[in-house]
Image (spheres, rainbow, N blue to C red):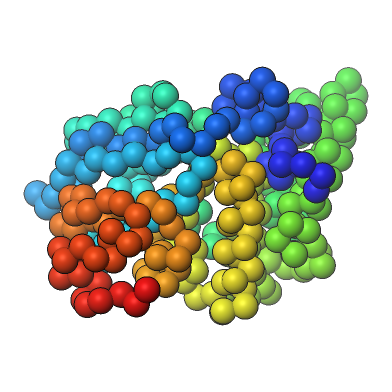
Amino acid sequence: MSDSRQVGADPDGQADAESNTDETGNRRTAGETILAAEGLRKSFGGITAVDGVEFEVERGTITGLIGPNGAGKSTTFNLLTGVHTPDSGRVRFDGTDITGWQPDRIARQGLVRSFQIARELEDMTVMENVMLAPPDQFGEGFWASVLPGFRGRVARQEAELRERAWETLAFFELDDLANERAGSLSGGQRKLLEMARVLMTDPEMILLDEPMAGVNPTLEEKLLDRLHELQERGYTFLLVEHDMDVVMNHCDPIVVLHQGQVLAEGGPQLVRNDERVLEAYLGGTVES
């Protein structure tokens, strides 16, 4: 890949100037807020899962979202990505109020999530899984796929997408497995495939739900390397992760949830030394 725009470029090979890049073709400057949770509340059957959660994610960061089981992490993720609609509060992404939007519309806006358990299509090949990810493909429409006047356009786009898919698989060192069934991959390889599929949607920000769960140390190191390389290219990440070594060494800042509320927020050193965090979640001193 010759430049930062090739991983996650659009089908025409150009970045989206309104959502992903500035007028020079580079991703916009870090240091500004890209995602904001504003007083989010959500209850289920009288039980409050999220109670006034507020935090911001700065563009270009890898932000950690941690907390004990039942702290509200998954519900917060679901509120941010449109799976649930908050009872009150707002979600703002890249300056737009996306509260109540459907997940597919949010994804098209550039906010995309992966899941704790990779959701590949097991009976399809690795390449086919990646090729299916980009939205608005011409071949998905009936008339475009059968009428002579449109078939050339479909073929051109498919060729462009296939080139992007090869580049993305190579980035994650999955190109040698392109023709293998996705169901034959290891747990770690499936996580890499999930990330490849996410990148093919041309996201601005990626939410990762326990990306290191079930991943062996070698593939974990590879995944973390790719995460930081993508950060250097201007992508933004918010991740839920229970591995404190990963969180403390690779996330900055960190948001700590407890009983549906933000307990602490700041850099790893501040969180590591916060007695409330140690008591509520970490259960003692975290090694430096």
In front of the other: 288 or 264: 288
Asked if residue 70 can be seen in this view, the reply is no
Q: Residue at x 59, y 22 (%)?
A: 18
Q: Residue shown at 30%/75% (left/top)?
A: 286
Query: On the picture, is 79 further left or further right than 30?
Result: left
**Res 8 seen here:** yes
Quadrant of the frame with the C terminus: bottom left
Quadrant hosting residue 195? bottom right
Picture quadrant of residue 116? bottom left
Query: Of 11 and 139, which appears nearest the observer?
Result: 11
Which quarter of the figure has residue 139? top right
Residue at 20%, 36% in the rendered image: 39
Say if 260 sits above or below 10 in the image.
below
The image position of residue 219, as x and y in percent, is 62, 73
Number of marks in the rendered image: 0
In percent of width and height, residue 45 lies at 13, 50
Residue at 85% from the left image edge and 27% from the top image edge: 153
Horizontally, is 171 left or right of 102 in the view?
A: right
Rendered position, 269 above or below 265 = below
Q: In the orientation shown, which residue stands out farthest toward the left?
A: 46
Image coordinates for residue 5, horizontal then vertical, percent:
72, 38
Relative to 201, is 56 on the left or the right?
A: left
